[in-house]
Amino acid sequence: MAIVVNLDVMMARRKIGLTELSDKVGISLANLSILKNNRARAIRFSTLAAICEALDCQPGDILESVEKPVR
Protein backbone atom coordinates (compact mmCIF):
# COMPACT_ATOMS: atom_id res chain seq x y z
CA MET A 1 0.00 0.00 0.00
CA ALA A 2 1.06 3.57 -0.63
CA ILE A 3 -0.33 6.85 0.69
CA VAL A 4 -1.22 9.45 -1.93
CA VAL A 5 -1.63 13.12 -1.01
CA ASN A 6 -4.58 14.70 -2.81
CA LEU A 7 -3.90 18.23 -1.60
CA ASP A 8 -4.04 19.63 -5.13
CA VAL A 9 -7.55 18.21 -5.57
CA MET A 10 -8.81 19.75 -2.33
CA MET A 11 -7.18 23.07 -3.17
CA ALA A 12 -8.93 23.10 -6.54
CA ARG A 13 -12.28 22.23 -4.94
CA ARG A 14 -11.88 25.07 -2.43
CA LYS A 15 -10.49 27.43 -5.09
CA ILE A 16 -7.48 28.36 -2.99
CA GLY A 17 -3.96 28.95 -4.23
CA LEU A 18 -0.67 27.76 -2.80
CA THR A 19 0.32 31.19 -1.45
CA GLU A 20 -3.01 31.74 0.29
CA LEU A 21 -2.96 28.27 1.86
CA SER A 22 0.64 28.76 2.94
CA ASP A 23 -0.32 31.99 4.71
CA LYS A 24 -3.32 30.38 6.42
CA VAL A 25 -1.44 27.27 7.55
CA GLY A 26 1.86 28.92 8.40
CA ILE A 27 4.19 26.62 6.46
CA SER A 28 6.57 27.56 3.69
CA LEU A 29 5.61 27.52 0.03
CA ALA A 30 8.39 25.00 -0.61
CA ASN A 31 7.09 22.52 1.97
CA LEU A 32 3.50 22.99 0.87
CA SER A 33 4.55 22.44 -2.75
CA ILE A 34 6.24 19.16 -1.77
CA LEU A 35 2.96 18.01 -0.22
CA LYS A 36 0.88 19.25 -3.15
CA ASN A 37 3.05 17.43 -5.69
CA ASN A 38 2.88 14.17 -3.71
CA ARG A 39 6.63 14.09 -2.96
CA ALA A 40 6.38 14.22 0.83
CA ARG A 41 7.66 11.29 2.84
CA ALA A 42 5.96 12.38 6.08
CA ILE A 43 3.58 14.98 7.50
CA ARG A 44 3.13 16.14 11.07
CA PHE A 45 -0.33 15.75 12.53
CA SER A 46 -0.28 19.43 13.50
CA THR A 47 0.40 20.39 9.87
CA LEU A 48 -2.32 18.05 8.61
CA ALA A 49 -4.77 19.47 11.15
CA ALA A 50 -3.94 23.05 10.11
CA ILE A 51 -4.41 22.20 6.42
CA CYS A 52 -7.73 20.50 7.15
CA GLU A 53 -8.89 23.51 9.15
CA ALA A 54 -7.90 25.93 6.38
CA LEU A 55 -9.60 23.81 3.70
CA ASP A 56 -12.59 22.83 5.88
CA CYS A 57 -12.06 19.13 5.22
CA GLN A 58 -11.10 15.86 6.92
CA PRO A 59 -7.68 14.13 6.74
CA GLY A 60 -9.27 11.40 4.60
CA ASP A 61 -10.11 14.04 2.00
CA ILE A 62 -6.39 14.73 1.59
CA LEU A 63 -4.75 11.36 2.24
CA GLU A 64 -5.65 8.23 0.31
CA SER A 65 -4.36 4.67 0.56
CA VAL A 66 -3.76 3.01 -2.83
CA GLU A 67 -2.22 -0.26 -3.94
CA LYS A 68 1.33 -0.08 -5.23
CA PRO A 69 1.71 -1.23 -8.83
CA VAL A 70 3.32 -4.64 -9.27
CA ARG A 71 6.75 -4.44 -10.86
Image (tube, rainbow, N blue to C red):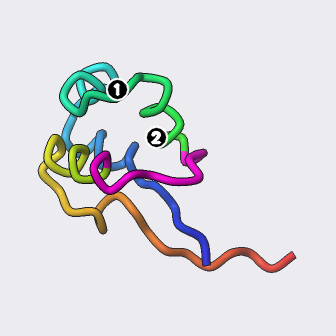
Looking at the picture, which amino acid does disc 1 mark?
Answer: Leu
In terms of secondary structure, where does tag 1 sit?
helix
**Mark drawn on residue 36:** 2
Label 2 to label 1, Cα distance in Å? 9 Å
Q: Where is residue 6 in the image (x, y as percent from the top left)?
A: 42, 54
Query: Eyeballing the image, is 20 above or below 57?
Result: above
Q: Is residue 57 above or below residue 12?
A: below
Query: First in sequence: mark 2 or mark 1?
Result: 1
Q: Is mark 2 on a helix, strand or loop?
A: helix
Q: Left or right? Give the position of 61 relative to 57.
A: right
Figure quadrant of residue 50: top left
Q: What is the chief secondary structure element of the magenta stretch?
A: loop
User: Residue beneath label 1, please?
Assistant: 18
Look at the image and tell me in which quarter the N terminus lies: bottom right
Q: Residue 22 magenta-drawn?
A: no
Q: Are marks 2 and 1 in contact (CB under 8 Å)?
A: yes
The magenta stretch spans which residues?
38-47
Residue at 31% across, 19% down: 19
Classed neighbour count for the residue bearing mark 2: other residues with Cα under 10 Å, few (<14), some (14–19), many (≥20)? some
Q: Judge from the rendering whether residue 6 lies leftward or rightward of residue 46; answer left or right.
A: right
The amino acid beneath tag 2 is Lys
Camera-side residue: 9 or 29? 29
Q: Position of residue 62 (x, y in %)?
A: 34, 58
Compared with 61, 10 (above or below) is above
